[in-house]
Amino acid sequence: MTSEGWGTPPVEPVSQHYIVCGGNALAHRLILELVEHYEVPVVVLVADRSRDHAPQIEQLSGVAAVVEYSSISDEALRAVSIETARGLALVEGSDRENIHAALSAQGHNPDIRIVLRMFNQRLGENIERLLRNGAALSGSATAAPAFAAAALGRPNSVEVGGRFLHIAFDDAITSDRICIVADHIDRQDLSKIRLMPEEEGGSAEFVRLASEFGDDGPVRVGAGGGSGTGGDGGGDGGSAGVRRDVEPLPQAVAETGGVAALQALPIEPREPISWARRLRWRVLDTARFFTSARLRLVLLTAFALVLMSFAVLWYLSRDFGWTVYISLLDLAGAAQPDQPADIAAGTGTGGGWQRAAQVVITLCGITFAPVATAIVVEVLASGRRGLPRNPSAGTRDHVIVVGLGNVGTRVAAQLHELGVPVVCMERDPQARGIAAVRALGIPVVLGDGPFEEQLRRARLKHSRAVVAVSGDDATNLEAALEARHGNPEVRVVVRLFDDNFAGHFYATLDNAASRSVSYLAAPAFAAALMGREVRGTLSVLRHVLLIAELTVEDGSGLIGMNRHDLEDPGGVRVIAARVARSPHLQWNYADRTRRLGPGDRIVVAATRSGLARLNTVLVDEG
């Protein structure tokens, strides 16, 4: 019992272990990754054993100990045997707290591998330079692309070597796919899905026939007639019964249900939004930003009167240049009116209609000055009050993001970068994401009222998707169901931690998707803790596919292995390779027998267990 914290340190001495600091959802998933796939001893440091996911973490069989301290102090680090640990993951707390803990841990154990969660990615890059062996990752940045892509109804992508890898399903799979990554996809029962199934080569049909009939057996009659014993085909007749353009994919779809494949595009797929829609959104949004509804009404009325008066002057004078000149003078209040003597002499420049039009233009010009002043005052006052923008009446075809935590803020920013209109909803007026989206000019609906009213203010009827990414599963589900009730055609994307909850969600709602931030981010954190470079994660419904780049170094366990050795146990596909001294990345590297040497780099698509197996090879044999 100490003044800084309390808890029971490990009863038995522990070494060569990994320490996870945190009791949140990301910590829970990360610990599962480490104990189930990497099979390493884990010691957990939590602030409170009774809160968040700490009770579930204590029940995990692979956890060596759970130690409770209120802060990550030097005493807490000594209690979890920081001096003999191989790795430390800091996945809870503020950026400042994690930086302080990382530097303290490095002081106790200079060789320890440190992975810390950082919301500020730019700051994280600078912190990495201070750590001898560390990496700074953002869980929200890792997961946000999957949420943004799901809102637009398309898979997210990962850039590798100038190409953008993404997951395609069923009919969207093209002939130039890299590899099949999943089959047995049943959206009503996601437990049936198989990741990285065994894939037959193009010669599989020939091998099957040879095994079935033997050397002296008959040859099956082909689909197009003809046989191997006669016909006009001569020596080629024997192969007439076998299709040369074998297309196993449609058959696989028919026999095993849905299929997913990894594909590469030369450019990142962008949301097709026409320039007219973008211009309309910008004009309406800019007008709404600088004016209130009443000011817009005054301005539009005055502008309409000016146009009508301009048309009258042009009709009477038949001189467009003179009409523009006199209209501008009238707007500025500098027009020279007709003198009574000129009118009496018949030398006046216009009649009664012209004079009336000039009076109208002059009055409207007088109106514009105070209105412009009012606009400036309102904008400055709103800025001082820090008030977020509300969605305008012209908001159409937008995405509603519910929750401005780390994930919601990044999802909104990413959609905004793609040119997609965004409206945010947040119940907590102190949420730090409000200032971030306000700086981007994204409207925010604030308030803790019923979701029905909040969604109505966010113009749900005219939206294309609703992304609910608050930190609570029940709140996200409530927002999604309320959105679907208000607009049956809207697409809903929900952040859910519980897999069973997500299964029921998929089975109940159409045009819907669920993602788990911790499920998407934890594999990348685990791989980084093991010193592996994960380029990104791709979502296959509720499952994760990792894209990693591995470098073959002197003493590495990869030396001497070929593509067959890497892929044979399953869970791994070599999708590209860069041999030593070659600047180019070779996609679909066909040589399965060439053995890896120092300086080679390979890009793999792997399941969590597959990447963990490669890590075991590197650790045990390296």
Image (spheres, grey):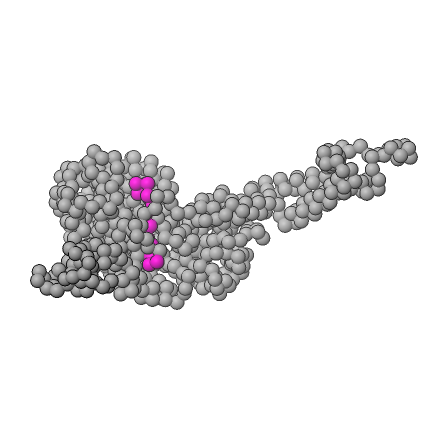
Can residue 105 be spotted in the picture?
A: no
Numbered marks: total: 0
Q: Is residue 608 magenta?
A: no
Find the magenta span and give its range: 159-171
Where residue 335 sits, quadrant-wise, is: top right
Q: Quadrant of the C terminus?
A: top left
> Is 299 positioned to the left or the right of 247 in the image?
right
Q: Is residue 164 magenta?
A: yes
Question: Which sits in the foreground, 83 or 603?
Answer: 603
Magenta stretch, main secondary structure class: strand
Can residue 579 be spotted in the picture?
A: yes
The residue at the far front in this view is 232
Question: Which sits in the foreground, 378 or 502?
Answer: 502
Question: Which sits in the foreground, 506 or 304?
Answer: 304
Name the residue rendered at 62%, 40% in the picture. 376
**Image coordinates for residue 10, horizontal then vertical, percent:** 19, 52
Name the residue rendered at 43%, 59% in the picture. 492
**Image coordinates for residue 127, horizontal then vertical, percent:** 32, 37
Name the residue rendered at 29%, 35% in the picture. 130
**In the image, residue 274 above or below residue 554:** below
**Image coordinates for residue 125, horizontal then vertical, percent:** 33, 38
Name the residue rendered at 26%, 65% in the picture. 255
**Image coordinates for residue 484, horizontal then vertical, percent:** 47, 63
**In the image, residue 182 above or below residue 83:** below
